[in-house]
Image: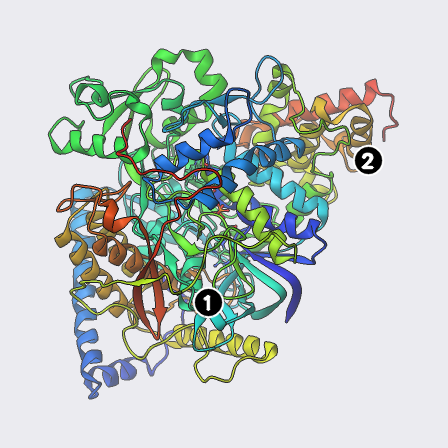
C-alpha cells in the first residue's frame, strides 16, 4: 500500500496544477496517471487560454461573456472566480517559462476568439496546450513530486454510509499497467480527480483514445452526482476523416466558412449577422449541419474553412501547427486549399459536481478540469475557457486538499433542501443490469480507513479475476464501437425525443452485452485489453447520464438543441441537472443556477451573435 | 487471426455445457444475442472486405514474456481492410479490434502530439498516427523502437529515456521576475527557441542514434535539445546559461555527438536536433568551458 497526503488522479493540466499547488502548501503529493504526464490530452489544445490581462479589458467583461456564452446556466461565483484569477495564473505560467507567442514589445500575444468581446485569448502558436502541459510537468519535475505513471485508477476507496454526503474518500485503487498488480493508495488528506474528458463516448471526436470519462464514472458510482451531463460541446471545425481539431484560432485570425456554393454561410443565411464565423461554437456547428442537411454541404458531409487570404507569413507565425494537421491528417495544403471541416464532439461542459474549492459532496474527494463541473461553462463553453479552468480550479483543489482555508463556498453540492426531484421518461430500465453493483462497499461496516482500502482492493481484484478468467463472450471493442455509433447518431448536435429514446435503448443493449464481456489477453503484463474493458464500462455509464439528462431537459439551451422544444424556457429550466447513482440506479434531480454575482445579478437574455 | 492462448482440451466441453444448461432466462437470451452479434460481425467484416476489396498486409512484432507461445519473439501477419487516408495506427487498431485483442501498443491522441506511438515502421522510426499507409510499401513491418527494452509486443520501456530527459534540469529557472506582469521576451528569441519547444518526448531520435545505442549514459538528442530550449531562452539570464552549458558539457554530453543526423532525420516534429547540438557545442567553446 502506498500512502501520501494528497493523491491526484490524472496528470493533464488540471492534475499537474493541483499537484504543484498542494505541494506548495507543504503536502506530500503523489500523482497517479494512466499515461505518462506529457502524453495527457491537454497537450492537444491548440487555440489558447483566456485572461483579461490588458488595459481596456476587465475580469468583469470576461465574466459577462462567459455567462452569456453559458446561456445563463453557469454559476456566477464559479465564473467570477475563474475570470478574476486567470490573469494571475497565466502570468504564473509565463513566469514558469511557458513559451507564449509575443508582441513587438515582448509581451504575450492575445487574439480574438468566438464569443469574446475583447481579444483576450493568450496563446503559444497553435499548440498552446502542448506548451502548457510541458511547462506544468517541468514544475512537477522541479519539485520532485512523486509520479506513478502508467497506473490505471479503477476504483475509489470510499466509506459506505447510507448518504453520499456522509461518506469520506480515503484513497484509490490502481492497476500498475506494466505488471498488472493491483494496489491501494491511501490519501491522508484528499483525492483529486483530474481525469479529463469523456469524448470516447462518441465516434467522431477531437478527444484522445484515453478520454474515457473514468473519473466521472468512478465518482458517480461512489455516490457523487454528475452535473449538466447533457451539455456536450460539438466543435464546428474538425477534420471529417479523423475528428482532428482545426483550432478556433483559424477563425479568430480571420478564417472564413464557405458552403458548396462558395457562399459565406454564416452571413448569407443569417446564422450570426454580427459575429459571423466567430459566433459561439453551438451556433456555428448548427449552421454547418443545417447547410449539409439542406443540400449545400460538400460531398453531403462538410463545409470549407478557408485561411488562404491570411497570407503565408501570418499563417506560419500563428497557425503553423494547423498546416501540419491539415496536411498529415487530411492531405490538404492549407496555404493553397480550403480545409474540409465538420462538427465533432469536443468537450463535456458537465461532470463531477464540485464547489469553488473543488470539493464534492463526499468529503476528501475533489475534482478539477474537464472531468469536473463547478459550472463555469453552463450550457456552452467559450473557446479558450477550458485551459484557465484547469489551472484556476486545479490550483484551488490542490490548495484546499492540502488544508488551506479558501473560505466558505457559495456553491452547494449534494442533495439538499434546494434540490428538486426530476423524472426521466426512459423506454428501458436505467442503471445496473443485475443486482445493484456500486463502487461503494455494501455491508454497512466499512468506515475505518484501512478496512475501506482493503475492501476496495479486494473488490477490484475480484472484478479483474472475473474478467480475466472468463474465456468466452463479447469483447469490449464491439460494445464500444456500437455505443459510440449510437451516441453520434442520436445524441449529437441535433436531438429529437425519438432519437434520444433510441439511444437509451442502444445504451441498455451495451450494458447487457457488457454483462458478457471478457478479456481475451491472458497476460498480466501491459494488458491494454483489460484496461480498455474497464474503460468501456465507464463509457456506458457516462453515455447514459448524457442521454438521460438530454431527454429530461425539454428546452433549447446552449449546445442542447431539441427538435420538439425550440425555445429557451427560463422560467422552468434555469437549473442544473444532477444525476446520482443510488443503489445501482441513476436518480435525477435539479438545483438552482446562481445568477447573483458579487456585485451584480446576471439577467438572462436571448443570445445573439 | 493469431491467438497466443494455448488451446486446452476441455474448452469445447465447456462451451457445450454453457449452451445446454438451464441458465436463467436472461443468460439464455444473452447467449442467443451473442450468436447473433457474432453473425452480424462476420457479415460486417465480409461486407467491408467486399466493399474495400483492398486489404493491407501488416507484419507485426509480437512478444510477451508471460505467455506461452509468445515468449519467443516472432512476427504475426494481419490483413486489414484498407480505407483511404488510413494511418499505420489506424491499421494497428483495426488489427487489434477485429482480430487479436491482445495486440499491444501505446497510443492516445491520434494527432502527433502525445508522442506515445513512435515505432519502427518499415525500417525507420516513425509516429504511427502520422504515417499514411499509402506512403509505405507492403507488407508494412511494425516493430518496437530499436535499442530499447521490449515490455510486450510494440511497447518498449521508456524509463531510461525519461531519466535522460530529466537529467538536464528541464525546468525554467530564474529569480528575476517582474511583479504582477509577464517577463518580456523578444519575438526573435522566441523564434530561436520555438522549434526546440516542440519536442513531444516520443523517443524516436534516441532510438535512431548510434552513439546512444553504444553509450547508455549519453544524454542523447532529445535531452540535449531540452537543454538547448532553456539555455537559449533569454529570460533565464546569463548565469543560468553558464550552469546549463556545464551540464551539457559533461562527459556524456554534447561532445559525444558525431553529427550523423539520424535524430534530425526521424524527428516527427522536424526539430533540427543536430544543429541544436552543434550550436550548444559552439556556445560551450565560446564560453571557454572545459571539454572532454
Ligand atoms: C483538440 C483539443 C483542443 C482544445 N483546445 C483548447 C483551447 O485552445 N483552449 C482551451 O481552453 N481548451 C481547449 N481544449 C479543451 C481542453 O484542452 C481540455 O478540456 C483540457 O485540456 C482537459 O484537461 P484535463 O487536465 O482536465 O484532462 P487531460 O489533459 O485529458 O488529462 C487527463 C489525465 O487523466 C489521466 N487519467 C484518465 N483516466 C485515468 C485513470 N482511470 N487512472 C489514472 N489516470 C487517468 C490521463 O492519463 C491524463 O493524465 C481543447 C481540447 C481538445 C480535445
Ligand atoms: S526531439 Fe523529436 S524525435 Fe526526439 S523525442 Fe522529441 S519529438 Fe521525438
Ligand atoms: S497517438 Fe499521440 S503521437 Fe501518435
Question: Which residue ends up furthest to the bottom in the rendered image?
Answer: B22
Q: Residues within 10 Å of mark 2 (few under 14, many from 20)?
A: some
On whether disc 1 and disc 2 are found on a single subunit, the reply is: yes
What label sits on residue B276 in the rendered view? none
Report x, y in % for residue A10.
53, 53
Task: Locate the N terminus of chain A and report the quarter of the image it occupies.
Answer: bottom right
Residue at horizontal 16 percent and vertical 50 percent from the top: B47
Report x, y in % for residue B283.
78, 21
Look at the picture and state if A421 lies above or below A77: below
Toward which corner of the image does residue B181 lie, by quadrant? Answer: top right
Residue at horizontal 35 percent and vertical 50 percent from the top: A200
Report x, y in % for residue A83.
50, 36
What label sits on residue B69 in the rendered view? 1
Side (left or right) of B32 relative to A401: left
Q: Which chain does tag 2 point to?
A: B
Q: Residues within 10 Å of mark 1 (few under 14, many from 20)?
A: some
Look at the picture and state if A264 lies above or below A224: above
Q: CA distance from mark 1 to mark 2?
A: 45 Å
Q: Is residue A12 shown to the viewer in this render? A: no
Instruction: Mark 1 and mark 2 in contact? Answer it, CB < 8 Å.
Output: no
Say which element carries label 1.
loop
Q: Which chain does tag 1 point to?
A: B
Toward which corner of the image does residue A172 lie, by quadrant? Answer: bottom right
Q: Earlier in the sequence, mark 1 or mark 2?
A: 1
- Residue that mark 2 sits on: B250
Amino acid at each position: 500500500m502506498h500512502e501520501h497526503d494528497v493523491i491526484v488522479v490524472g496528470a493533464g493540466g488540471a492534475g499537474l496544477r493541483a499537484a504543484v499547488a498542494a505541494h506548495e502548501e507543504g503536502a506530500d503529493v503523489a500523482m497517479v496517471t494512466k499515461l505518462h504526464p506529457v502524453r495527457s490530452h491537454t497537450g492537444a489544445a491548440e487555440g489558447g487560454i483566456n485572461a483579461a490581462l490588458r488595459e481596456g479589458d476587465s475580469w468583469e467583461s470576461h465574466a459577462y461573456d462567459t455567462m452569456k456564452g453559458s446561456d445563463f446556466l453557469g454559476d456566477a461565483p464559479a465564473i467570477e472566480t475563474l475570470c478574476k484569477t486567470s490573469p494571475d495564473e497565466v502570468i504564473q505560467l509565463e513566469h514558469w517559462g511557458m513559451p507564449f507567442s509575443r508582441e513587438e514589445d515582448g509581451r504575450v500575444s492575445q487574439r480574438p476568439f468566438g464569443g469574446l468581446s475583447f481579444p483576450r485569448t493568450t496563446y503559444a502558436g497553435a499548440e498552446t496546450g502542448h506548451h502548457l502541459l510541458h511547462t506544468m510537468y517541468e514544475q512537477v519535475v522541479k519539485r520532485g513530486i512523486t509520479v506513478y505513471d502508467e497506473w490505471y485508477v479503477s476504483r475509489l476507496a470510499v466509506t459506505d454510509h447510507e448518504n453520499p454526503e456522509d461518506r469520506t474518500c480515503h484513497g484509490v485503487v490502481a492497476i500498475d499497467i506494466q505488471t498488472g498488480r493491483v494496489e491501494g493508495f491511501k490519501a491522508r488528506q484528499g483525492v483529486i480527480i483530474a481525469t479529463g474528458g469523456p469524448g470516447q463516448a462518441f465516434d467522431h471526436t477531437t478527444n484522445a483514445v484515453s478520454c474515457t470519462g473514468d473519473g466521472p464514472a468512478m465518482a458517480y458510482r461512489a455516490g457523487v452526482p454528475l452535473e449538466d451531463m447533457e451539455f456536450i460541446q460539438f466543435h464546428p471545425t474538425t477534420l471529417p476523416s479523423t475528428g482532428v481539431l482545426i483550432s478556433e484560432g483559424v477563425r479568430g485570425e480571420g478564417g472564413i466558412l464557405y458552403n458548396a456554393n462558395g457562399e459565406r454561410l454564416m452571413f448569407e443565411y443569417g446564422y450570426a449577422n454580427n459575429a459571423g464565423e466567430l459566433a459561439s461554437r453551438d451556433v456555428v456547428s448548427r449552421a454547418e449541419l443545417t447547410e449539409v442537411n439542406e443540400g449545400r454541404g460538400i460531398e453531403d458531409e462538410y463545409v470549407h474553412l478557408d485561411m488562404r487570404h491570411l497570407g503565408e507569413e501570418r499563417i506560419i507565425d500563428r497557425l503553423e501547427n494547423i498546416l501540419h494537421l491539415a496536411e498529415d491528417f487530411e492531405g490538404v495544403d492549407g496555404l493553397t486549399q480550403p480545409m474540409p471541416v465538420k462538427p465533432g464532439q469536443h468537450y463535456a461542459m458537465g461532470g463531477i459536481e464540485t464547489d469553488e474549492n473543488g470539493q464534492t459532496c463526499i468529503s476528501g474527494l475533489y475534482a478539477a478540469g474537464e472531468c469536473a463541473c463547478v459550472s463555469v461553462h453552463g450550457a456552452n463553453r467559450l473557446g479558450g475557457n477550458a485551459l484557465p479552468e484547469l489551472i484556476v480550479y486545479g490550483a484551488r483543489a490542490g490548495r484546499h486538499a492540502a488544508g488551506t482555508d479558501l473560505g466558505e463556498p457559495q456553491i452547494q453540492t449534494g442533495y439538499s433542501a434546494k434540490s428538486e426531484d426530476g423524472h426521466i421518461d426512459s423506454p428501458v430500465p436505467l442503471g445496473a443490469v443485475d443486482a445493484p453493483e456500486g463502487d461503494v462497499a455494501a455491508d454497512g461496516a466499512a468506515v475505518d480507513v484501512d478496512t475501506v482500502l482493503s475492501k476496495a482492493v479486494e473488490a477490484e481484484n475480484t472484478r479483474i479475476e472475473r474478467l480475466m478468467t472468463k474465456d468466452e463472450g463479447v469483447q469490449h471493442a464491439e460494445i464500444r464501437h456500437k455505443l459510440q455509433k449510437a451516441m453520434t447518431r442520436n445524441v449529437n448536435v441535433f436531438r429529437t425525443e425519438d432519437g434520444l429514446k433510441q439511444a437509451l435503448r442502444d445504451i441498455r443493449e451495451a450494458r447487457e452485452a457488457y454483462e458478457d464481456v471478457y478479456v481475451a489477453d491472458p497476460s498480466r503484463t501491459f494488458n491494454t485489453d483489460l484496461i480498455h474493458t474497464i474503460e468501456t464500462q465507464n463509457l456506458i455509464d457516462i453515455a447514459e447520464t448524457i442521454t438521460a439528462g438530454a431527454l429530461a431537459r425539454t428546452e433549447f439551451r446552449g449546445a442542447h438543441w431539441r427538435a420538439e422544444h425550440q425555445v429557451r424556457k427560463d422560467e422552468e429550466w434555469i437549473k442544473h441537472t444532477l444525476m446520482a447513482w443510488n443503489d445501482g440506479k441513476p436518480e435525477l434531480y435539479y438545483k438552482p443556477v446562481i445568477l447573483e454575482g458579487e456585485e451584480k445579478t446576471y439577467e438572462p437574455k436571448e443570445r445573439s451573435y | 487471426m493469431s491467438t497466443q492462448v494455448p488451446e486446452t482440451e476441455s474448452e469445447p466441453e465447456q462451451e457445450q455445457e454453457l449452451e445446454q444448461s438451464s441458465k436463467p432466462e436472461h443468460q439464455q437470451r444473452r447467449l442467443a444475442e451473442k450468436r447473433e452479434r457474432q453473425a452480424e460481425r462476420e457479415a460486417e467484416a465480409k461486407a467491408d472486405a467486399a466493399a474495400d476489396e483492398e486489404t493491407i498486409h501488416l507484419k507485426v512484432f509480437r512478444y510477451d514474456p508471460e505467455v506461452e507461445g509468445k515468449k519467443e519473439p516472432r512476427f504475426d501477419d494481419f490483413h486489414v481492410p484498407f480505407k483511404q487516408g488510413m494511418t499505420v495506427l489506424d491499421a494497428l487498431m483495426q488489427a487489434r479490434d477485429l482480430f487479436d485483442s491482445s495486440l499491444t501498443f501505446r497510443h492516445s491522441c491520434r494527432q502527433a502530439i502525445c508522442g506515445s506511438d513512435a515505432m519502427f515502421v518499415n525500417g525507420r522510426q516513425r509516429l504511427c498516427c502520422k504515417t499514411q499507409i499509402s506512403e509505405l510499401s507492403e507488407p508494412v513491418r511494425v516493430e518496437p523502437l530499436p535499442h530499447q527494452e521490449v515490455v510486450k509486443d510494440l511497447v518498449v520501456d521508456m524509463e531510461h529515456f525519461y531519466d535522460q530527459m530529466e537529467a538536464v534540469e528541464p525546468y525554467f529557472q530564474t529569480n528575476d521576475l517582474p511583479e504582477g506582469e509577464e517577463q518580456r521576451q523578444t519575438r526573435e528569441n522566441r523564434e530561436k527557441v520555438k522549434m526546440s519547444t516542440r519536442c513531444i518526448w516520443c523517443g524516436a531520435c534516441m532510438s535512431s542514434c548510434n552513439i546512444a545505442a553504444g553509450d547508455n549514459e549519453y544524454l542523447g538528442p532529445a535531452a540535449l535539445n531540452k537543454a538547448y530550449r532553456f539555455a537559449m531562452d533569454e529570460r533565464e539570464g546569463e548565469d543560468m546559461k553558464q550552469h546549463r552549458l556545464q551540464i551539457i558539457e559533461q562527459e556524456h554530453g554534447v561532445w559525444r555527438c558525431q553529427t550523423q543526423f539520424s535524430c534530425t532525420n526521424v524527428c516527427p516534429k522536424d526539430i533540427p536536433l543536430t544543429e541544436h547540438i552543434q550550436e550548444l557545442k559552439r556556445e560551450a567553446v565560446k564560453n571557454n568551458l572545459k571539454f572532454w
